[in-house]
Image (cartoon, rainbow, N blue to C red):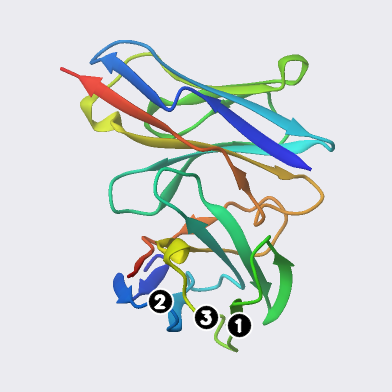
């Protein structure tokens, strides 16, 4: 069984400040891990994914995430927030054997960026 | 290239009715998955189809069914609608190869009154 916990349903930062969105996962098998972003009234867009090739994963729009097996974490960061980053972010996990279609998502973190 | 397209974008139904949601995957994608996203929650996996065969099913009642057509488009059917079925229904496609990322459509917003 797999699960994802996103700490903090709402995060607020100032423009230009560091963005840190937390994700912890539980998986009985080696996982694939993903971060998706959802803008209002839209579907989900893939930011980045971890597939065991490298523990530090760089994604689109300046985001990156680090896989830490010892901490079962996959936190998302961005050095400098931009107003356009305001959205909801979802962390997701899937088993490496099962394919990436059956994702288990966290409940999401809504990011607000203040001017 | 067109992304994943879903229709309709919005739908209002009454309890007890049934509904059909449609999805066209990205050209060349053979796998389609359906997710339900209730307000304030993350998406939940409902079904996955690959080459017209069901590959996976989430923890949803038998009122939910789906199928995939020879052109890889897909329908999600929900019978005997309940108020709790109100949600954003997302369709996603990928090539079906392990590890290939999902591409999501903008969803169908279903409201059951």
- Of all chains, the one bearing label 1 is B
Judged by depth in the image, the label closer to the viewer, 1 or 3, is: 3
Judged by depth in the image, the label closer to the viewer, 2 or 3, is: 2
Q: Earlier in the sequence, mark 1 or mark 2?
A: 2
Work out whether B102 lies above or below B86: above
Query: Can you give x and y, in whole percent of width and height, for residue A112 in the image?
Result: 28, 25
Q: CA distance from mark 1 to mark 3?
A: 9 Å
Q: For numbered disc 3, what is the local secondary structure? A: strand
Judging by the rendered image, the residue that carries numbered circle 2 is B15
**Whether residue A53 can be seen here:** no
Quadrant where the image shows the C terminus of chain A:
top left
Disc 3 packing (10 Å; few <14; some 14–19; many ≥20): some
Left or right, A100 with respect to A16, comes to: right
- Of all chains, the one bearing label 2 is B
- Of all chains, the one bearing label 3 is B
Judging by the rendered image, the residue that carries numbered circle 1 is B67
Q: Earlier in the sequence, mark 2 or mark 3?
A: 2
Q: Earlier in the sequence, mark 1 or mark 3?
A: 1
Disc 2 packing (10 Å; few <14; some 14–19; many ≥20): some
Q: CA distance from mark 1 to mark 2?
A: 23 Å
Judging by the rendered image, the residue that carries numbered circle 3 is B77
Query: Can you give x and y, in whole percent of width and height, for residue B37 in the image?
Result: 46, 54
The answer to which of A52 and A104 lies nearer the viewer is A104
What residue is at 67 percent from the left and 55 percent from the top? A102
């Amino acid at each position: 069984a797999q699960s994802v916990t996103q700490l903090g349903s709402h995060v607020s930062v100032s423009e230009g400040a560091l963005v840190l969105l937390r994700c912890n996962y539980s998986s009985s098998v080696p996982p694939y891990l993903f971060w998706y972003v959802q803008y209002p009234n839209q579907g989900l867009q893939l930011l980045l994914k971890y597939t065991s090739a490298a523990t530090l994963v760089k994604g689109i729009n300046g985001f990156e995430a680090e896989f830490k097996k010892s901490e079962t974490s996959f936190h998302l960061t961005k050095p400098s927030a931009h107003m356009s980053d305001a959205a909801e972010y979802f962390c997701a996990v899937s088993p490496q054997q099962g394919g990436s279609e059956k994702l288990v998502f966290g409940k999401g973190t809504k990011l607000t960026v203040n001017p | 290239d067109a992304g994943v397209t879903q229709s309709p974008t919005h739908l209002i139904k009454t309890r007890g009715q049934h509904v059909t949601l449609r999805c066209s995957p990205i050209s060349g994608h053979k796998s389609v998955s359906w997710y339900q996203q209730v307000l304030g929650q993350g998406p939940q996996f409902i079904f996955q189809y690959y080459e017209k065969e069901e590959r996976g099913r989430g923890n949803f009642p038998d009122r939910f069914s789906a199928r995939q057509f020879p052109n890889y488009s897909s329908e999600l059917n929900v019978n005997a609608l309940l108020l709790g079925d109100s949600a954003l229904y997302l369709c996603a496609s990928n090539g079906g190869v392990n590890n290939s990322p999902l591409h999501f459509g903008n969803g169908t917003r279903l409201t059951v009154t």
